[in-house]
Amino acid sequence: MFLANGIPHFVHGVSGKPFPSPFAQPPGVGNSSPVVNVLWGSANFVGGCLLLGAMSPYQPGYNGETAALALGALTLALGLAWHFGRVQAARGET
């Protein structure tokens, strides 16, 4: 569930589009900023991966390389959300 929920939040975030999240006003109805959606989508991905790893006989290798990849992906996604959020706002599409 967490992995599936992370997809629309993350995609809307990196596209620079607002999307409802639990942090919006009112929660789940109003739109949150693209950066908030990238963070929320990423949190869902992390939670889903941790639950999947805890429930699966397969033990994924969480190591320094995995952490560096995740941190790099999050940094890039936040930069894209910030940039495209400004582009969408300038066009009046948000």
Image (spheres, rainbow, N blue to C red):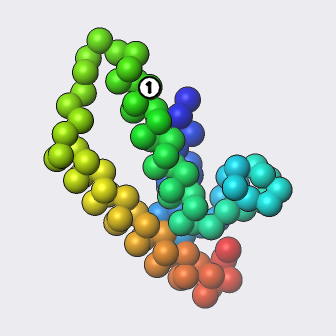
Location of the N terminus (image quadrant): top right
Going 42% across and 70% down the picture, which residue do you hit? Answer: 80
Q: Is residue 15 visible?
A: no
Rendered position, 88 above or below 9: below
Q: Is residue 13 left or right of residue 63?
A: right
In this image, 56 relative to 93: left or right? Answer: left
Q: Nearer the viewer, residue 39 or 12?
A: 39
Q: Residue at x 43, y 67 (%)?
A: 78
Q: Measuring from the top left, give residue 10's x and y in whole percent.
A: 50, 53
At 40% from the left and 30% from the top, the residue drawn is 50
Kindly tell me whether residue 52 is visible in this rendering. yes
The image quadrant of residue 75 is bottom left
x and y percent of residue 82 in the render? 49, 75
Vertical arrangement, residue 87 with respect to residue 15, above or below = below
Q: Quadrant of residue 26?
A: bottom right
The x, y position of residue 37, in whole percent, is 57, 58
Amino acid found under the numbered disc labelled 1: Leu
Answer with left or right where residue 36 lies relative to residue 29.
left
> Which residue in the protein does label 1 denote?
51
Q: Secondary structure at mark 1?
A: helix
Q: Quadrant of the C terminus?
A: bottom right
Residue at the far top in the pictured view: 57
Q: Residues within 10 Å of mark 1 (few under 14, many from 20)?
A: few
